[in-house]
Image: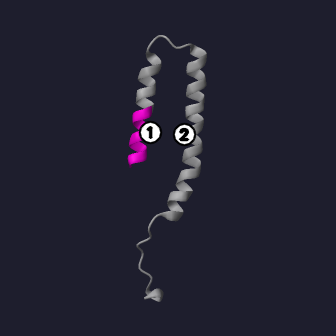
């Protein structure tokens, strides 16, 4: 939950920051493309790691 909150905050902050004048359009597009690439790669590789390493609280009768 903390990661989602941090990512949402960052997206909102970048959106507000990009609306201010003083930064070229090409630089804005490059930063936006790199950020989107980072978020997509993070989403693809983070969820399997979280799924595998999360605690499992199921009770198995065979294990006692």
Estimate the x, y position of residue 45 in percent, counting from the top left.
58, 51
* Residue at x-position 42% and y-position 75%: 58
Discs 1, 2 touching: Cβ within 8 Å: yes
| 46 versus 36 height, above or below | below
Quick one: SS at disc 2?
A: helix
**Dot 2: few (<14), some (14–19), or many (≥20) neighbours within 10 Å?**
few
Q: Quadrant of residue 38?
A: top right
Q: Quadrant of residue 11?
A: top left
Which residue in the structure is indicated by mark 2? 39
Quick one: SS at disc 1?
A: helix
In the displayed structure image, the side of residue 26 where residue 4 appears, left or right = left
Mark number for residue 7?
1
| 8 versus 20 height, above or below | below
Estimate the x, y position of residue 29 in percent, counting from the top left.
58, 22
* Residue at x-position 44% and y-position 21%: 17
Q: What segment is highlighted magenta in the picture?
A: 1-10
| 21 versus 12 height, above or below | above
* Residue at x-position 57% and y-position 26%: 31
Q: Earlier in the sequence, mark 1 or mark 2?
A: 1
In the displayed structure image, the side of residue 48 where residue 21 appears, left or right = left
Considering every residue shown, the one lying at the far top of the view is: 22
| 28 versus 60 height, above or below | above
């Amino acid at each position: 939950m903390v990661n989602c909150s941090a990512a949402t905050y960052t997206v909102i902050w970048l959106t507000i920051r990009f609306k201010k004048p003083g930064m070229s359009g090409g630089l804005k597009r490059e930063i936006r493309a790199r950020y989107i690439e980072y978020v997509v790669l993070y989403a693809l590789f983070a969820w399997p790691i979280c799924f595998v390493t999360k605690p499992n609280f199921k009770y198995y009768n065979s294990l006692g």
